[in-house]
Each structure stands twice: as C-alpha cells, then as structure tokens.
Image: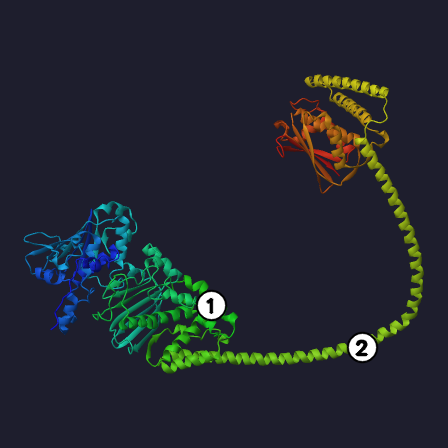
Amino acid sequence: MPEKLEFKVSSGLKDIIGRDLITDDFIAVFELVKNSYDANAKNVFIEFKEDTIIISDDGDGMSIEDIKNKWLFVAYSSKKQDDQEDDFRDKIQKRRHYAGAKGIGRFSADRLGDDLVLTTKKLDSKNIQQISVNWNKFNNQKEKFESVKVDYLPLEDYSIPFPKNSKKGTILEIQGIKGWDRSKKTSLKHSLEKLINPFSESTDFNIEIFSKDELTNDSKEQIGRNKVNGPIKNAILDILKIKTTQINVQVTKDHIKSKLIDRGTLIYQIEEQNKKLNLIDDLKIDLYYLNTSAKNNFTRNMGIQPVKFGSVFLFKNGFRVQPYGDTDDDSWGLDYRYQQGYNRRLGTRNLFGRVEISTNNTTEFKEVSSRDGGMVETQGYNQLMEAFMNKGLLRLERYVVGVLWGEAFKRKNYFGQDEIAENYRKELLKKDQESDNLSIAKSNLGSKIDFIQLIKSLSTDDDIKIIEFNKDLVNLVNEQLDEVQTKFIADLEKIAEKIDNPDLDKIINLTEERYNQILREKEEAQRRAEEEEKRRIAAEEKAKKEEEARIKAEERARAEVERRRAAELEALRKENERLRAVEERRKEEERRKKEEDARKDAEQNLEHEKDKSAYLTATRKTLSEDAEELIHSIKVSVIGIDEGLEKILRRLRTDKSFDKSLYEEIGKIKFITDKVMKLSKLITKSNFKADQEVRKVKISQFIREYIDTYSYAYTDKIKISVSGNSDFISRISVLDFSIVLDNLISNSHKAQAKQIDLEIKDSKKGLDVLIHDDGKGVPNEFLKNSNAIFDLGVKSKIEGSGIGLHTVKKKMKENLRGDIEFLGNGIKYKGATFKLSFN
C-alpha cells in the first residue's frame, strides 16, 4: 500500500499570486474595484490620505464565515461556485456577469502597501467584521502559507463610512503607499475611465476619487477629466456622438446582426445566421473610423488626441481586459496588417472602438494570470478574434477604403481609364476627409460604383439577408453614365433580383432608360460624325484635284516665261560678270587704302603712347644746371605770387562789399599760377612737349602712372591706392587733368585724410573715377545742396580759397569732356566721395 503525501505551500506564494502577477499600481486598483463590482456594489470611493489609500464600496459585504471560507481561501472563487450552484432563475435575475474568476484579485493590495485593514458588514448582520494583514509576515519562504496568522476583530456599534451612507459594504484601508503625486492620481483617473465599458449606457456602477491635497490645484484646472477629485465619467459616449463612420455588430447564439452607419446616415443593415461562432452567445463589436474631422472633434472635446487615448478596447463582462487598446499595443494585429497593405487597410491611428464579450464560460474566455497579459488563446478566443476581423474590421475597412478613399474603383479599373478614376479619387481624398457629412461621397460617381459592388458582394452571399441599404449611393440616374461601364447596370439588376425593393426597381429602371438614351445619343452623334467625315473627305478630294489642275496650268505658263527670259538672262549674266570685275577692282583699291590708313593710325597711336609714357616716367635728361636754377626761381616766384593771392582772397572774404567779378579775376590768376607751378614740375621731370598737351590718353593707365610718379609729395602724409581698370581712351589735356587730381588730393589732405582710394570702373556713358577718402568729409551745411561747393568763392570752415573745386568743375566740363559730382560722406570710408565722369 503506497504512502500518501501532500503538498506544502510556502508563504512565498503571496508574491507569486500578488505583486508578481500585478505588474503596476493601476492594475492593483483595478482588481480591487472589480471585486467591489462582483459584490454588487453600486458605488466605489477611492480616497487618498497621506500614505494611505482607502477603497470603500456599498456592496453585499462579508460575514465572518465569508472571510474564513472565501476571502482567506487562496485561489477560491465564489463566482465559479455560484455559477455551479445557482439554478436557471437565479442566473437570469443576476444583473451582470462576474468580472473576476480566479480568486487572487485580493492580493492586489500587497502591490499598493505593506498593511491592509479590511472592514466589512452584511445588510442582515449587526456586527462589523475587521481583519488586519501585514504582508511582510509572508516573506519567510520556509514558513508555511497557512501558518501566517491574520488579526481578526469583531466590532459592535462602530460607525463605518460606507459610500452613500450605505448599511452594508466593504472598506479596504491600505497603508504605506508611495509615489502617489498629482500626476499619478490623474493617470489613475484616466485609466479608470476605461476600466468599465465606456460604451455602456448603464449608470448602476459609479467610481469616485477623493484627495483633499488636490482640491486647490483642481480649482485651477479647466479640463474636467484632468481634475483628481470627482466621479469617473465616461465622456466617450458623447464624443462618439460626433459623426463618424462606424460598424455595429451583435453576435448571439443564433444570429449575427450588423449595421454600417456613416456620419449619421445608414449605409446598410444585414443579418446572417451564426453558424461558426458556437462558443459565443453575447458579443458586441463597435468600431469607429475617425477621419480628420472626427479626430479634431475628439481632441477638442477630450483634450487628448485619439491615438494617445487608445484604439480598440476589449471588455469581458463589463470590465476591460488589458493591454487591448493601449497606446502602442497591437494585440488585434491592426498595425501589422496596415504595414502589409498601406492605403488599403485601417490601423490603430484611425480606428477606435470596443469589443464586449459577456460570458460565464471562464474556460474558453479567460485572462492570463498576469493581469496585463491579455486573453488565453483558446478556441473561444480564436472565435472572438474571427468575429472581430471578419464581421467587424474587414466590413468597415471595405467601405472606408473602397467607397470613401476610392482605392478599390481605381485599383480594379472600374472606369476603364486610369485618368477618370484618379480624378474621382482625388476629389474624395481632398474633401471627404474634412467633412462631417456624407455629401461628398454621395456626389462622387466612383464612390457610388464601388458601393454597388459592395452591395452586390453582400447580396450574392446566400447566408446574408440585406435588411436595408442607402438608396442614394446606388442612384446613377443623374450621373455621367457615358463614363460607366455596361456591367454596372447589369450589377444593379442582379442586386434587384436578390432584394425585393420597389424603390430600387424604380432607380434601376430610370438608370437603364437614361443609360440607353445616352447610348442612342452617342450612336447618333457617331453617325453624324461619320457622315460629316465622309463629306469632308469628298470636299478635300475635289479641292485636291482642282489644285493639281491649277498647278499644272501655272507650270506651263512658267515654262513659257522661262523660255522668253532665257536669252535675256544670258545677256544679263555677261553684263553682270563685267560689272563684278569692275566692282572687285574697286573693292581691292578701297581695301589697300583702309590698310594704309590703319597703319598710319596705329603709328600715330603708338607715338602718342610713347609721348605719354615719357611724359610721366622719363628721368631728367636734357636740362642743364643753369636751366634747373632758372626753373627753381620760377617756382619760388610763383609760390610768392600764390601766397599773396591767398592773403588777398582771405581779406576779400571778410569784406561783405567786395566786387564778385574781382574775385573771379583773382581766381583766374591763381589758376594760372597753379598751371605755371605744374609746368615747372613737368619740365624738370620729363621731356615734356607743350604742343602735345592735348592728346589721346588711356585714363586708367595715366592715373596709375601719375600717382606712381608724383605720390612722393604725399607718401609721408596720405596713403594713395588705385583700384579697378578700364580700356577707356579719351582725348584730353593731360595738364588740366593733372591739376584736377592735385586739387582733389590737396582737399583730402586739408580734410586730414590718411587714406585715398581712386576706384576706376566703366559706365554706360564711358568711364567713372570715384575718389574716396577717410577725412572729415564735406561739412553738413553742404549736404542738402551739394552743388554749392562747386560755386566760386564758396568754402567751408576747412582751410581753402573757395576756388579749387570751382576750377575742377570748370576744367572737367570744358577741357576734359566730363564732369564732377559729390556722391556723399561715408560711402567707402568715413570721408567724402567724389565722382569724375568721362564721356
């Protein structure tokens, strides 16, 4: 006889069925709330106090026997037992199925805090039962689970605050909680919104959160769902009243009923027998396609984007099964399918909804032990997924992708021409996405044709009975039927054969009449076009023959004229040959003359360039010492004359009654002294020829050589540079141009300039030379009327005679074929900028 042995259970079992299965605090709260739901509670309060969370309900409560035989009985589920013991009448009177069935949800309290005080009372009991559990006592794995004791205390005449002043209920007081800040409490509230089926219109189970610490912050919050305190409200029902495209499927033991609605308009309603889903007798599927308009309305009302709220949630017996519907969760395989068929399938970003299974068949429809692990893959689970996919998603997807997106009629080549299909599809994608009504699709021929194909596919399935469908979407009477292939008229007739509907028959008859009329019109138009083409060809043939006859007559006349002119042409040819010979001799003489003139001009230009180069760069060659002394005496005398003239001019300026004509005469004398001074310099520095003072000069080359030769007078005071270049040549007085340059450089020196730049560049009229310096610039008194600085006798506070710029202006116009103008201060440097223009 074999010896009988038995299992021993370690106290470590508490962690295995508690915090190891309950992966986060929210799921722990969910499990405890679900226990209140299963206890027939109508209200659950969740209150936060310092390090304590209190979960109280107004459910049936427990007696001491219930605590001993059920609550303290690990893995015992009264729900399973009740299902076995209740008779039929008891079952149909239950208000709902049970949310839990494993008997381990109570260990969720261990996840939240170290200590639990459970206080409970039944309606027919005078005593209040209270037990205290310290979960840390279960940490010694060598100790047996059942040997760890739980404190029990019966209470009499003790006022317990059950919700809504109820006489019965259960209170869980969990101490030692951590990390429950405002953000976490708000997240718990948002999660609890999805705990109870948010699509259910039942209001017999309410959850409310209390936290005095958050009342001040709540008063500042504008969005209701972001306040911690207050009841858990499922605003999703109001959100889904927004007009969207949706399919509603209800599966019972015998039938499957489906209804497709688009933005408040019924599209079709069908019914079929439930032949394959034999394990399902109460299933509801509600799927919503959110276009751009619906997404915007969702975000505006909920304060959160749909993709961040979740997608398709799964509910079992009224409570949510996680993680179905969570952000970034793809338990339904939606995003995987979407990636395989982009633009032909719906993903989590544009789907929202719920799948609700109500059942007591815990074997076929059960959650995995880890509360966020989803459903166990059983035969019942596979039927659930098949119903979701084939009866819900695929039918909604077929309508959205085909009728609303136009993908089907374009891909299946309904129109026969890609361009026509693409135009209808672009119209849909451009406007329908932003619309909250069905008018765009109803007015789109491509959408109508695809809807006809959709209804045809439903009507050809013998298991499906079409209860109702949208007549506007099959009405082609007022459409451009010449773009429609004949087969679609035949498809309408097939639909009518399967569906006994007088309105549809009327639409089909009118459509056929209109289509036949269009065919007749096209045939008549084709006949007229063919006759017109025949007449056109005949006229063209006649005109062609007449043209050929005319051409032949003209050719004969031209031949006669040619014969008459042949002799004349021969005589003309000989005369032309003689004239060409004479002309060639004349041209040869002109060519030789031009070559001779060009040679002379080249020699003259070469001589001018040589004279100019010698004028600027040659060293002293011919003057004797006596001649140099004589030139020096001339310089001294001229300097004395110039200084005397300066004194006279300064005195005249202080005398307001002086004669201006006298001033002009003195200015002419001073210019002559400047010229004599310049001549003395030139004579000593070059083999200057007075009779060649006016000559052709390449201006840019002259300026560079002049600055290089005579800048010795300024090198210790001013840095002078030349930039730019030009091939411009003009016939000018080099002496006058030298005096112009000296006057401008002298003025810069008087303005305390340290840098001068002569910028050479071509212009439309000829050549421009810009003189920039970094001196004090032209005084402000002349900026509004800059031309005044060129008037005779006008001078600024800067030292000068008032003659220099007047002389420069005069010589530029008279002897240099140009002009001078003041451009302004601070153009390149901080000082003045003048422009010399040569035409």
Label 2 crowd bin: few (<14), some (14–19), many (20+), radius 10 Å: few
Q: Residue furthest bottom?
A: 497
Rendering coords of residue 39 (x, y %) = 15, 62
Q: Nearer the viewer, residue 247 or 161?
A: 161
Identify whether 279 is placed above or below 160.
Answer: below
Name the mark on residue 391: none
Q: Quadrant of residue 63?
A: bottom left
Q: Is the C-beta separation of discs 2 and 1 under 8 Å?
A: no
- SS class, disc 2: helix
Q: Quadrant of the C terminus?
A: top right
Q: Amino acid at mark 2?
A: Lys
Residue identifier under label 2? 552
Q: Earlier in the sequence, mark 2 or mark 1?
A: 1
Work out how far the residue at label 2 is from the one at label 1, CA to CA, in angstroms: 60 Å
The answer to whether residue 205 shows anywhere in this view is no
Horizontal relation, residue 627 to residue 657: left or right:
right
The answer to whether residue 103 shows anywhere in this view is yes
- SS class, disc 1: helix
Q: Quadrant of the N terminus?
A: bottom left
Q: Nearer the viewer, residue 658 or 235?
A: 235
Identify whether 288 is placed above or below 802.
Answer: below
Identify whether 768 is placed above or below 35.
Answer: above
Residue identifier under label 1? 425
Q: Quadrant of residue 428?
A: bottom left
Rendering coords of residue 739 (x, y %) = 76, 28
Q: Nearer the viewer, mark 2 or mark 1?
A: 1
